[in-house]
Amino acid sequence: MKIVVCVKQVPDSWSERQLRADHRLDRDAAERVINDLDTYAVEAALQIVEQHGGETLALSMGPASAEEAVRKALQMGVDAGAVVTDDALAGSDAVATARVLAAAIASLGADLVVMGVESTDAKMSVVPAMVAEVLGWPMLTQAQALSIDGATATIERQTATGHDVVQADLPAVVSVVEKFNEPRYPSFKGITAAKKKTVDVLTLAGLGVDPTTVGTAGSPTSVAAAQPAPTRGAGVIVDEDPAAISALVDFLAERRLV
Amino acid sequence: MATNVERELPDSDAADLLALVREICDSELIGQAAEYERTGTFPRDVFHTLGRSGLLTLAHPEEYGGGGLPQAVYLQVIEELSAAWLTVGMGTSVHSLGTHALAKYGDAAQKEKWLRDSLSGERLNAYCLSEAHAGSDAKALITRATRDDDGWVLAGSKAWITHGGVADNYTVIARTSSEGDGAISAFWVPASLPGVGANPPEHKMGLKGSHTATVNFDNVRLPADALLGELGQGMKIALDALNYGRLAIAACAVGVAQAALEVATAYSRERMAFGQRIGDFQGVHFMLADMATRIAAARQLYLVGARRLDAGKNVVAEAAMAKLFATDMAMDVTTDAVQVLGGAGYTEDFPVERYMREVKVLQILEGTNQIQRSVIGRALVGR
Ligand SMILES: Cc1cc2nc3c(=O)[nH]c(=O)nc-3n(C[C@H](O)[C@H](O)[C@H](O)COP(=O)(O)OP(=O)(O)OC[C@H]3O[C@@H](n4cnc5c(N)ncnc54)[C@H](O)[C@@H]3O)c2cc1C
């Protein structure tokens, strides 16, 4: 079994993030880290391989520094890495990104692709499904558990009313949520070993991707405007009288929190 | 937050290791410490996390699954862990102390049988030398291992044992004959053997998350190969382990003192009195300067011992000096940190009162600081 885990390098979500004049994220303004949810995907892949054997590969698309996110996955125990990096990629939206990742996955070969359900920078939550679509593979979304039996993948997904259990034939794409597991820390040995693992650099030409279908030019969406989030307004203060209880219940019910 | 100490490290692997340790301190240790210490809960899970990352066995032989790192790197990890949570930093060093006899004096068959498992990261070991009436005077111990046909029978009680009741294995120093220099030997005792038991943990003034208990050996039958090293080598083995252990206790003391200094410094930049920051008063200024200077000196002292160990040199006096200086320093520095924070420092809203209670024990265990002075004095004037 060969599992590709997609990882993205994002600005640390604990730091102050800034937009540039063209509404794109200023990637130099904050420390760059591996997207947190992608470490859950890495953990999922490692667990599957620990149970069933096989190999794992971490794939990232981005600037050359994206290799650092791949290295983090290698430190956790992933076997090898690949980075698609190309000047023409700058400004790629979700559709263009999915096109590139799918081309890389097709070229690398995989039985299973595991991805985090969203990235902390763009927060689109659409790339996993788009990758599956481009590949023509089934998509199992928002998994909080995953098991493999022969050529079948089964996931569990929490819904508003209960649990869905969804199956698909391999090859398939799975996106995982935070509830899935607790990602491991790298081990000291893993850190040393990661330095010796190879990270291949893939280019658009090598993957046979037409540069006009990616980057700003190949992206059907663009950010028209951006505003800072409004500062939080004052809360509602409910007086301490018997009516407060029903007021609070109504407040929560309105927001579907109870 | 993990410490802001700029470390002396030999290579980029060691730098990456320290970065990993700080990440784990920030996410797994610092936020939990106060609650576990308040309730006296032993953080077994934290040791599992450290074990899976290879941090419990950094200085042990690679051949059996250890990290194979020099003491000079390992001890800086102990310092970082202790700055985050002394129970964890000291516990990691005591695990090493409890593994030392097997790793250094065990034969190939014993190491194959027990060391590999001990270094898996899933196990926690303990070191049993002290007895209720035999602490400083360790040679007065009466726990006895008697030969029987196919092995040994171990009987006696060991007092104040760190990880007593929670350890997987005990290194036990016991009497194998009535008198003479060769009367004491070292044994490997898995906690799962029938007859091994522990009393409830002691109620202590600090370091409550670390369980300290009397461990009882009620006629425990040991196999013949439970003997580590030669018959009669026990005291030598126990003291050799303490050379390593005392340097680690020095590193623990430096860690807590560093944490206290960082809290005190941050507070002195914020707290206003008489219209200025308290850190701008020369009285406070000088206190912080003395704290920082003594911490830096203590750090160098344990590193001197570490480098000597790494070079295969004797460290009996150096380990005693580092332990003595660093733990007395930490007692003073944590006391001064409470002083810098004033009333706030005396409350549980800040960690410094806890640090002060915790480091007190470092002046007592692995040889009281009076005993360290005797060791240093004997090295100077001879016996
Ligand atoms: C939290 C904790 C954890 C511990 N963990 C372990 C462990 O894991 N394994 C283990 O084996 N032990 C452990 N110990 C025991 C510890 O090593 C002993 O408490 C210590 O060696 C002192 O022995 P004692 O308590 O019997 O004090 P005593 O020996 O009774 O000493 C009492 C006082 O007399 C002084 N004194 C004694 N002899 C002399 C002398 N010759 N010259 C000058 N002054 C002297 C001492 O310095 C001390 O001030 C632990 C203790 C504590 C508190």
Image: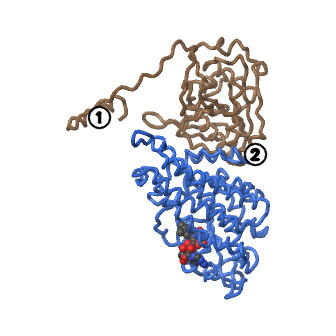
Chain colours: A brown, B blue
- Give the secondary structure at mark 1: helix
Disc 2 beta carbon < 8 A from ligand 1?
Answer: no
- Quarter, ligand 1: bottom right
- Give the secondary structure at mark 2: loop
Q: Nearer the viewer, residue B233 or A178?
A: B233
Q: What mark, if any, has residue B11 been given in the picture?
A: 2
Q: How many marks?
A: 2
Q: Residues within 10 Å of mark 2 (few under 14, many from 20)?
A: few
- Res. A140 image quadrant: top right
Q: What mark, if any, has residue B243 been given in the picture?
A: none
B341 left or right, relative to B44:
left
* Quadrant of the frame with the N terminus of chain A: top right
- Residue B214 lies, in percent from the top left, at 53, 73
Using the image, name the chain to which the residue with label 2 belongs.
B
Using the image, name the chain to which the residue with label 1 belongs.
A
Q: Amino acid at mark 2?
A: Asp
Q: Is residue A129 above or below residue B1?
A: above
Q: Amino acid at mark 1?
A: Val
- Residue A6 lies, in percent from the top left, at 66, 31
- Residue A32 lies, in percent from the top left, at 63, 31
Q: Residue furthest bottom?
A: B178
Q: Residue furthest left?
A: A242
- Res. A186 image quadrant: top right
Residue located 68% across and 26% down the image: A61
Discs 2/1, front? 2
Q: Are marks 2 and 1 in contact (CB under 8 Å)?
A: no
Q: Is residue B332 above or below residue B233?
A: above
Q: Are marks 2 and 1 on the same chain?
A: no
The residue labelled by disc 1 is A249
- Res. B67 image quadrant: bottom right
Residue located 64% across and 41% down the image: A149
